[in-house]
Amino acid sequence: MSCIVLKNAAVNMLLFWGYPTSENYCTLDTTSGTFQDCLNLCLGKGNCMLAYGSDGNCNLCDIYATSSITQTTASNGIQIGVKVDTLKRCPVDLKDVQYTKTDTLDSYTLSYSDPTWTISYDKKCIDDSWKMFIRPQGGACLKVFKKPGLNQSDSGTLCKENGAGYELSGMQSKLEWSYIMESARALIGSVPTRDYTTVWLGGTMRPYCYPDNRPSNCTGIQAFENFPYQDNFDAYVFTPGSPNFTRPYPGQEYYNACLQLNLKQNKEAWDGKVTNVMCQFSCNGGTAICAVAYACVGLAT
């Protein structure tokens, strides 16, 4: 086990043999060659908390991605580097010291009890049933709820009941997409009477993108707004023909203005993809596709 002290830098890393052991949502990077390259990638990313792997195998974990690390030996072959506050020099025995990262709005403490390093975050969610991810405003808490038969408005109302600032959630990253998909699958299970089941997401169509006289910049996710605490949309992949800007009922003031995430049941081509649908109804296209869950988000405190 060792410690890296970077001269003329505001970031230090603890370096030892080990790997994250709690549920983690990390990113495999395929561009780095050596593990030192992997460490440098993490050092260059503000939200990256740790890097682990080996030469040719680099995993980057943002803050809140994991809460514990198992320390191993060189025989395991997996190294890990964790960002900590600046050290003038490395302590004689790293295990006897409690480390912190406090030069950020999302601070944490790293402490050791053989063979586990525990990462304790200053910010918390309502309870442990929520999963924390990093958003532009800091730690954000996500959770998927199952309740069949709700329209988009009712789902949003239930999200607000969790506390001030809680709204229907969008997907800031592909890691959040994975979390929502995994949570929804576990909650919903098999529904053989449906082609797809769906999860209500945040976001509504911009009024100037409604079918009549729609400008040319109303394409893809750009046609939507109202994504709380979100500035990245890489996780959104629309189903073929979506976004759909036609009027579901010509002559009536109904629009496909709200977003759902599809989960496969009898069909799977749209699995994991997004469609825009009428906000007023839980089922769209008859009863083949019905919303049975919704995702909420709020800032951690």
Image (tube, helix red, strand yellow):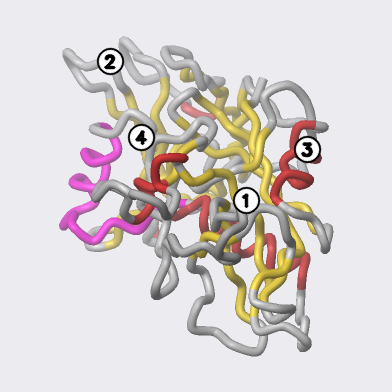
The Cα–Cα distance between marks 2 and 1, rounded to whole angstroms, is 28 Å
Task: Tell me whether circle 2 and circle 1 mark residues in contact (CB < 8 Å).
Answer: no
Q: Which residue is mark 3?
A: 157
Q: Secondary structure at mark 3?
A: helix
Q: Which residue is mark 1?
A: 22
Instruction: Please tell me whether residue 51 belongs to the stretch shown in magenta.
Output: no
Task: Tell me whether circle 2 and circle 4 mark residues in contact (CB < 8 Å).
Answer: no
Q: Earlier in the sequence, mark 3 or mark 4?
A: 4
Picture residue at 32% right of the left edge, 14% below the top: 89
Tell me the kind of residue under disc 1.
Answer: Ser
Residue 76: name its quadrant.
bottom left
Q: Which mark is residue 37?
A: none
In the rendered image, the vertical position of residue 284 relative to residue 206, given as above or below: below
Q: Which residue is mark 2?
A: 10
Residue range highlighted in magenta? 26-43
Picture residue at 78% right of the left edge, 87% below the top: 193
The Cα–Cα distance between marks 3 and 4, rounded to whole angstroms, is 50 Å
The Cα–Cα distance between marks 4 and 1, rounded to whole angstroms, is 23 Å
Picture residue at 56% right of the left edge, 55% below the top: 255
Q: Which residue is mark 4?
A: 2
* 89 sits to left or right of 251: left
Number of other residues with Cα within 10 Å of mark 3, as a class: few under 14, some 14 to 19, many 20 or more: few
Q: Earlier in the sequence, mark 4 or mark 1?
A: 4
The Cα–Cα distance between marks 2 and 4, rounded to whole angstroms, is 18 Å
